[in-house]
Amino acid sequence: MTAIAHPDATAGYQASAREQATHWVRQLVVIVLISAILLPIAWIFLTAFKTPRDVYSISSALWFTPTFENMQTVFRDPWNLGSKIVNSLAVAGGTVLLAMPMATMAAYAFSRFDFRFKQAIFLIVIASQFIPAAVVVLPYFLMFKEAGMLDTRTALVLVNLSIVLPYAVWMIKGFIDAVPMEIEESAMVDGAPRSRVIWEIVVPTALPGIITAAVFSFTLTWNEFLFALIIGKQHALTLPIGLIGFRTERGDLWELMAAGGVLITAPMFLISLLVQKQFVGSLTAGSVR
Amino acid sequence: MFPMRRIPAHWLLLAPALLFVAAMALFPLAYSFVLSFREWKLARSVTPGDWVGFQNYWYLLTDDPDFLEAIQVTSVFVVSNVLATLLVALGAALLLNRAGRINTIARVLLILPFVMSPALVGISFRFFLNGEYGIVHHLIGLAFPSMVDTIWLADSTLAMVAVVAADVWHWAPYMTLVMLGGLASIPKETEEAARVDGASAWAVFRDVTLPQLLPVISIVLVLKTVFALKAFDIIYTLSNGGPGRSTQTLAYFVYETAFNYYDMGYAAAAAYILTAVLLVASGFYLRLVFKK
Amino acid sequence: MKRRDVIQAGATALGLGFQPWGRAQAASTLKPGKPYAGTELSLLTVVAPQFKAHEAKLADFEALTGIKVKYQYVPFASTREKLTAELVAQGAQYDLLSVMDVWGPSLYNLFDPINARLAEKKIDMVERYPHAHLRASRDGNGDGKNILGMPIRGHVQLMFYRKDVFAKLGIKPPTTWDEMVETGKTIQAKTDLSGVAMYYGKTGAQNLMIWFNYLWGMGGDLLDAKGQPAFNSPQAVAATQAYVDVLLKHKVAPAASVSFNESDAANSMAQGKVAMYPVWWWRYAGLVDSKTSTLKPDQVGFAPLPSMPGKESTTYTNTWFYGINKNSKKKDAAMEFLAWISQPEIERSVLLDTSLNEVVAMQTKNLIDGDVNRRFGGMHLFGAQALKGAKGTPLFPQWAQVSDLLEATMSELATGNTQVKPALDQAAARARKILRA
């Protein structure tokens, strides 16, 4: 029996039979987890390369003649997924870039200070997101119409910023809360200005939280549908609008939607690989040997 | 020059986010809140109609069986959804919080379900469950022969299971990432100290890890509750609120009332009842969280 | 080949939008001298092959008038929301808007009546359009004086069936609903196909479309003379029972029908799993296209929808119209477009375009046209016949809510978990409340 190093073990430690079994069970469960995530995605992937005739049949589930037509069709008229993806990236990216600094500062304030009405203000900020979008989207529409900003990506960034800020503040606050205050306090006693303390001490330690909030904000904006639908017309159409466009009178054109799904998954997979390094970094820094 | 030093630091830090949210959200929230006290049927008039005081609210709570059914459906949906997500996320995070090839692969994949548009997820799951060509329907029929003829979306319970499963598939992997972030912030020294002292894995988890995870768990809990309450696209595309109205949640009800029945004042009132519930719940939550 | 066919082929080959001899007539509906040259119009519409075919002809329109029309496609599933935003904002985001009859009454306030403009152009709507389609563009629940737009897309229901299977079994398409059940049983006994693809699932009131045929065929109706719910009358209960019994009692529909929507049923037919499919005629293209279907054109036959024994077919129709936005500043130019796009010649040329399989036609002249019927095997004559006795969607303001209620009821009834009479009684009670509001 080969020695399997226990992940938390020091050198020379030999795993007992029970620990080995636990290890394999863990691996198995992780594989089940991966399958649960991957199977639907894999199925969507397959669907993207099928003709509609093959999509709606079990017999051609795995054996079919692949076609690239769906991938091509979604970029053409009237779907134009290409420009929609670009818009989505711009709006989501812009929202995150603006949201993170604002949210981090606010989260720090909520976490480290005590002031009157703190709880109430925090509640109100979060509560702004409790209202179902269906009811506020029309007033937003009227607002942007007055400002002449309809059908602009800026309008979408502004709307999404107001949507994600409460969550970002909340999440980052949670992570800052978990960081003990002593380090900052001693640094400030030593004369460091608060801004430097935040930048050099708090932000790095709460980085997993900030990244989490960034990913969350990005995805929320990425998937946001109703505001984009109502505010957009021609120039500010985003990916979700494109995807919903595949729900036609004829029914749900799943093969085209799946093609859209493929176009989403591939770049996100790459982004996740990149961000993953951060997570692994923080994991190895503090935990696993 | 404006004496910056006179303004307490926390206001300066809060200002950007606070002012922005206030500026953007004030008009829409005020508008829709005021609207809930008026009657406005778009089919009749292009501008809001008469003031009706609390009549919309009154009708909703006492005279609208659809609304009450929606509340029931929502409770079932939210509770099962949140619990399932929490358990899956926590379990998965603990599993994946180690080095190892497979774990790294898993962690990279975790973001993928979340970035799929909810509508895409809903439609895909609908196709997976289709009685004639759905792959999940087929596989379940192979594994459990008694279910080979079950039409998932025709049974109120199974339809609810499907809707919850779809939403959990969409969110739980991401919540796992959040939990992983939380686990990463826990100083490993305390865990090691406890283990060196001879505590079992379970005891370490219960007495050391879990308490330090509580802030993150509460984030996941509340976040998922809010989004479960707002979930619309995924239900709309998966089951369309059916069969009958068995998967028609409050969010669905509000949407239909506004954009299908064009009853704007009524929809606003329903939305604010939902908001009131959330406000009360989060009031309790905040009391917990702000206690240091 | 007949001389007309040759000219037609030539015209199509040259990419001309419509028949040469029709061109003179086309130009006469437009104002001479290009008075609106340089205007840009924006039309909110949905993706449909018919509209795409129209869009391909816009260059002709621009050449004739100097007006540029931009088709702004909105997801079909989200059109209501966009129209609501337009209505609330009272804006002019779009100069022309397309509306489906089921949404119509709630959105009347979007449009300016075009009666005067129609008179100016000497367009006789009653001559042009069957009553069932024209009423969708009138206000006042379909009976009003004002015409709010040009009907542009209209459908009738047909029964599609597997010609090859029927031929092999020596049976004919059913003429009554009872016959349909019998035919279904025969097919299920002798082949491994299911009888008829029904769709009872809850999606966009699709499960009511065939139900209406049963309801009206059996003498029931949605509302009575006083405008109160009548769909729990004895006839309506019987009709509903017969409707769900196709699946529940006779089992001649696939088991999955209970959750099918219209397109699931179409796929079932296209995959060769079912022998009959009662649906809108425009589904024809999808059933014979090798990309979407395993069936070939000679396998797909069509017949008028069955009726109740001894009675005329009472089909249900669906109509879209294009209307001019009340707040548009370019109404005159918009009317030019409406007049042009709605010419019979344009509709006819799309129908005869062999690169498409587009069957949608709504103008009486085209429905009885010889060339059109030759191409589609007489489908349009069926259509014209059906339209005589057809009733369109109910056009009262609360229809959206009542339809939602009925659709939920139907989907539940099809599961077999509730009984017809109590369910309809309950629905009627709720509808009464809705109608009071």
Image: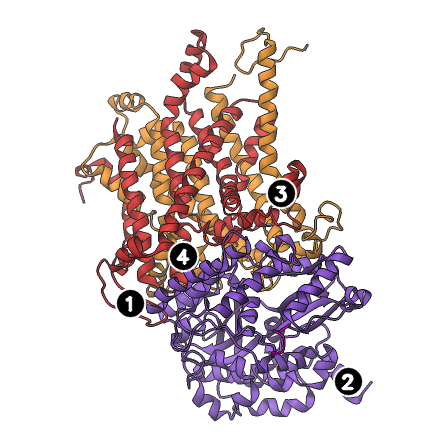
Chain colours: A orange, B red, C purple
Give the mark, 3 or 1, whose residue is nearer the N terminus.
1
Spatial CA distance of label 1 from label 2 is 58 Å
Q: Which mark identifies residue B48?
A: 1
The residue identified by callout 2 is C5
Image height check: is A67 above or below C278? above
C308 magenta-colored: yes
Question: Chain ID for label 1?
Answer: B
Few, some or many C-alpha atoms within 10 Å of disc 2 (few <14, some 14-19, many ≥20)? few
Instruction: Work out whether disc 4 and disc 3 sit on a shared chain.
Output: yes
Segment colored magenta: C306-311
The residue identified by callout 3 is B136
Amino acid of disc 3: Val
Classify mark 2: helix, strand or loop.
helix
Spatial CA distance of label 4 from label 3 is 29 Å
Give the mark, 4 or 1, whose residue is nearer the N terminus.
1
**Residue C43 or residue A149, whichever sits in front:** C43
Image height check: is B26 above or below A171? below
Classify mark 4: helix, strand or loop.
helix
